[in-house]
Image (tube, coloured by chain):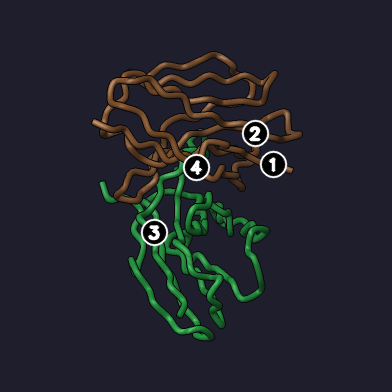
Amino acid sequence: GAGVSQSPSNKVTEKGKDVELRCDPISGHTALYWYRQSLGQGLEFLIYFQGNSAPDKSGLPSDRFSAERTGGSVSTLTIQRTQQEDSAVYLCASTPGGTLLYEQYFGPGTRLTVT
Amino acid sequence: AQKVTQAQTEISVVEKEDVTLDCVYETRDTTYYLFWYKQPPSGELVFLIRRNSFDEQNEISGRYSWNFQKSTSSFNFTITASQVVDSAVYFCALSRREGNQFYFGTGTSLTVIP
């Protein structure tokens, strides 16, 4: 079946512009995560959605970052007024929930470059 | 606070050698989960294993084995008879019971030389 998809795969933007990154989780997966992976670093947790519950936004690095998940499916991560330090690969993962809540399936990521 | 440390940044081995990737974690939780993920050159992370904090039994899956020791807060990963296809970046991670946050190490880049 289809895995987690993310778009665009690459995004180059100028400093100060806003960007939107999209994640399509696996159908039926209830939980969705966003991570940021900087060069040579591990994955940095950004935000977590679980069903209809309020999202866990504790990992968002600043108020320039926000995310939505519409209809419990597609999610959009928005970065406003991008800075060069925002350059990274942004990964999305989804999990089936229930007893499989912890088994994350990752998308290919969006490579964001801020010039 | 939760933290995962993978002290080995890069490892190179010759094909068929055994290799162990170290993972040390910090948490004050009594219930938590530990994971290993593989990120091949193609980029997508692949789930390898999950262990919960109450199960210290070692696990073997083919050429892969995992050693979980709560006494040393370690969750090490051994690849036996390594192959070129094992070349990847391997991440160790910890999750709290609620599963809302995962804490990843910085990864170990493994290169298997033919």
Label 1 close to label 2 by CB (< 8 Å): yes
Q: Is residue A94 above or below residue A79?
A: above
Question: What color does chain B have in the rendering?
Answer: brown
Chain of the residue where label 4 is placed in the rendered structure: B
Q: Amino acid at mark 2?
A: Tyr
| Neighbours of disc 1 within 10 Å: few (<14), some (14-19), many (20+) | some
Mark 1 and mark 2 lie on one chain; the one further toward the N terminus is: 1
Image coords of residue A73 (percent x, y): 43, 60
Mark 4 and mark 2 lie on one chain; the one further toward the N terminus is: 2
Q: Nearer the viewer, residue A7 or B90?
A: B90
Q: Amino acid at mark 1?
A: Gln
Image coords of residue A101 (percent x, y): 51, 40
Q: Nearer the viewer, residue B26 or A70?
A: B26
Q: Which mark is residue B25?
A: 2
Q: Amino acid at mark 4?
A: Gly
Q: Is residue B111 above or below residue A66?
A: above
Q: Which mark is residue B107?
A: 4
